[in-house]
Image (tube, grey):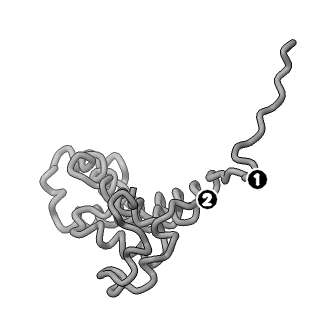
Amino acid sequence: MMHRHRLSRTRMRGGFLHSWLGDRVLHKSLWSPTKESIARAWLVGFPITVVPFLPLQSLFACLAALFVRGNLLLCIALQFLSTPVTAPVHLPACYFVGELVRGRQPAKVWRNVARHPRELASGDAVISLYLGAVVIGVLVGAGGYALILGTWRKKERVPGVSRPPMPPTDPNA
């Protein structure tokens, strides 16, 4: 995809990003989807996605990916999980987890939200919202990192063979 738009690591050498960020922006793991780079991108990209109302999320995700050498494209793509369409699920979940971390009982939390929804914009509710976002982001980010590393299977390649041999078939079976 990048080559169709005439964007490659060799063409980036000497350009604006290379002069500003150095050789780090040319590292292969930023641009190639390997098990390690995808896992690192999830580890840093998902917690940034979960933080509500964060301006310039994609910029922060790119900087985090550069720092840990995670896949840039996945870090940017993850930022599209946090949209106004996902907010009705995302924001209440963050608020609920934040309230639980602060020691409130789940039944009382939902009862309070149903009776006084305008209080969700108060300072106390905002603290719960961001606290829950941090907890969810760290847990799901670390869980996804472990899941990617644990389940990604690498295809075994046999030198000189373009595809694996087919098992013999028995016509009598």
Image mark for residue 34: none
Q: Position of residue 17 (x, y in %)?
A: 33, 80
Q: CA distance from mark 2 to mark 1?
A: 28 Å
Name the residue carrying label 2.
149
Q: Amino acid at mark 2?
A: Leu
Callout 2: 10 Å neighbours few (<14), some, many (20+)? Answer: some
Going 52% across and 57% down the picture, which residue do you hit? 144
Q: Is residue 17 left or right of residue 150?
A: left
- Look at discs 2 and 1 and give the one toward the viewer: 1
Of the 4 image quadrants, the one containing the C terminus is top right
Q: Nearer the viewer, residue 159 or 66?
A: 159
Q: Position of residue 25 (x, y in %)?
A: 42, 78
Q: Residue furthest top?
A: 172
Going 46% across and 69% down the picture, which residue do you hit? 30
Q: Position of residue 16 (x, y in %)?
A: 29, 82
Q: Nearer the viewer, residue 104 or 129?
A: 129
Element at badge 1?
loop
Would you identify the image quadrant in which residue 82 lies?
A: bottom left
Name the residue carrying label 1.
160
Q: Amino acid at mark 1?
A: Gly
Q: Is residue 131 left or right of residue 120?
A: right
